[in-house]
Image (cartoon, rainbow, N blue to C red):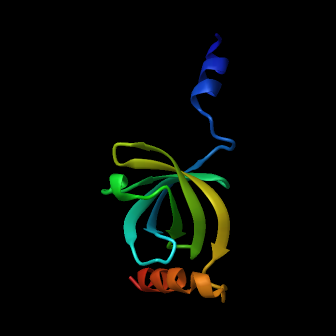
Amino acid sequence: MTSVTASKSVDRRGRLRQRALLAGKLANEDATVTFDCTIRNISADGAMIETTTPHLIPSHMHLIQVKEGIAWDVEVIWRRGNRVGLALKARHDLRETTEKQLRALRAIWSQMALR
């Protein structure tokens, strides 16, 4: 096995991720439970976050990226220590949304953006 083949088999990402250090918030489906997190890298279809409570995070949640006011539906792909790998699904712009189901996420983002 060549070194190129070996590195491809280890990294199963579909796209290259950009390193990041962004404030984030995870929220359950109805936004009644939230967890603070730091987004450490991100691409169009995935992200790696750090959180102090990785064992409490359910397999499907929303991830809010505070700076840009963006939320994604996410699925947990892996957990290692305090890091969690997420698949990013549907993307929502919280600055412009009027969807009833996203109002709670928008309220969370609005409070965090004021800090």
In the displayed structure, does residue 39 sit left or right of residue 93? left
Q: Which residue does the image show at 65% across and 12% down from the upper left? A: 2
Q: Is residue 70 above or below residue 108?
A: above
Residue 19, placed above or below residue 107: above
Q: Is residue 30 above or below residue 103?
A: above
Tell me residue 26's x, y (percent): 45, 67
In this image, 115 relative to 42: left or right?
A: left
Q: Position of residue 48 (x, y in %)?
A: 50, 50
Residue at the (62%, 57%) spot, across then down: 88
Considering the image in quadrants, where does the C terminus appear?
bottom left
* Residue lying furthest left: 52
Residue closest to the eye, 87 or 15: 87
Instruction: Count the numbered circles shown.
Output: 0
* Residue that appears at 36% across and 53% down: 54
Camera-nearest residue between 115 and 6: 6
Relative vertical location of residue 80 with respect to residue 113 in this rendering, above or below: above
Residue 113, image x, y percentages: 46, 81
Q: Quadrant of residue 80?
A: top left
The quadrant the N terminus occupies is: top right
Q: Position of residue 38 (x, y in %)?
A: 42, 60
Q: Quadrant of residue 5?
A: top right
Residue at point 34% right, 52% down?
A: 55
